[in-house]
Image (tube, rainbow, N blue to C red):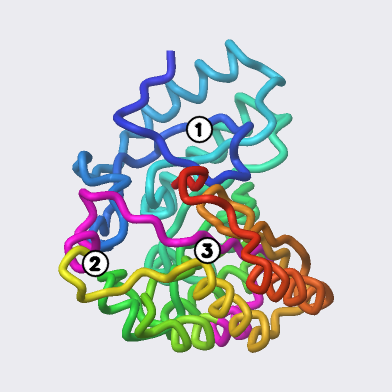
Amino acid sequence: MIDYEGAVWRPPSEAGSLIVQATIGCAHNQCTFCTMYKDKKFRIRSLEEIKQDIAYAGKNYGRQIRKLFLADGDALSMPAQDLLAVIAYAKEQMPWLISISSYGTALDVIHKGENQLKELKEAGLSMVYMGAESGDETILKEVRKGITKQQLIEAGKLLKQSGILNSLTLISGLGGRKLLKEHAINSAHVISEIKPEYLGFLTLMIEKEAVLYEKIKEGEMELLQPEDVMEEMRLFLEHVDSEGTVFRSNHASNYVMLKGTLNKDRDRMLAQVKKAHEDCLFRREKHRRL
């Protein structure tokens, strides 16, 4: 059977994928809003371990498997040669795969560089899911993201140049009420510079175990109310210029479900935001989920 260590996380769009842990945990693991990998010590699994899982899945599930997602938090941190070996083995065992993807931090992308990224693309790496969370320098520092705004832009452009699809994530409310405007506008600037193929918006939800929870509890940060989230989204949509980006804000954490393609669906989504704000058409708190 496939050997999973601890809780396994994947993007919503990978719900039907085979998930194989290439790494355990998250190499950075310092973000103040995140508790996903706090119970794990980061390590890169051996090629033998990874191949055993892939071989088992190929033998037992066959053509039921169409997509492969390499977990945990930043499988792209693996040495390029090892990652290439994993991809090659997966395609050997399951030549019918239509996509192979992974999480990857901006620093993972930058460290790989354009040439290695192109090698990975040619080998079969289809998409990298990159958590930007915010485009504001102050917020990135405060949540200990470990990257700068410029590094986010550099990483996004490297993925674009390599041909690897980029699914980028932002988090509404991450700057609290104090930095609402900065978060919205500076995030819009980053997206406009990168023009990722996909953009997903989550809305901030904090577990008690998160470092950020104490800051909120002590009054150092004020969480946004649904109306504030709508104002933040309005500002973002009004300032972003990312023609062709598939936009989704329909995660279980979101107050209002938005979906469309930038820039052509911007006016429709702005109208939806305005109506939700005016009529208080928000998902109830008890129905929101991480």
Residue placed at 34% from the left, 33% from the top?
Answer: 7
Q: Amino acid at mark 3?
A: Thr
Residue placed at 45% from the left, 82% from the top?
Answer: 183
Where's residue 187, x and y in %? 51, 80
- Label 3 and label 2: CA atoms lie apart by 22 Å
Q: Amino acid at mark 2?
A: Ile
What range of the chain is rendered magenta? 188-216
Compare marks 3 and 2 and give the one earlier in the sequence.
3
Residue 213's image quarter? Answer: bottom left
* Tally of numbered discs: 3
Compare marks 1 and 2 and give the one earlier in the sequence.
1
Location of mark 2 (residue): 216
Q: Secondary structure at mark 1?
A: strand
Compare marks 3 and 1 and give the one earlier in the sequence.
1
Q: Residues within 10 Å of mark 2 (few under 14, many from 20)?
A: some
Q: Secondary structure at mark 2?
A: helix
Q: Residues within 10 Å of mark 1 (few under 14, many from 20)?
A: many
Q: Is residue 95 above or below residue 10?
A: above
Where's residue 228, x and y in %? 50, 75
Q: Nearer the viewer, mark 1 or mark 2?
A: 2
Q: Is residue 164 visible?
A: no
Numbered circle sitting on residue 169: 3
Which of the two residues, 190 or 41, is positioned nearer the viewer here?
190
- Label 1 and label 2: CA atoms lie apart by 34 Å
Report whether 21 appears left or right of 272.
left
Q: Amino acid at mark 1?
A: Ile
Report whether 122 appears left or right of 149.
right
Residue 162's image quarter? Answer: bottom right
Q: Secondary structure at mark 3?
A: strand
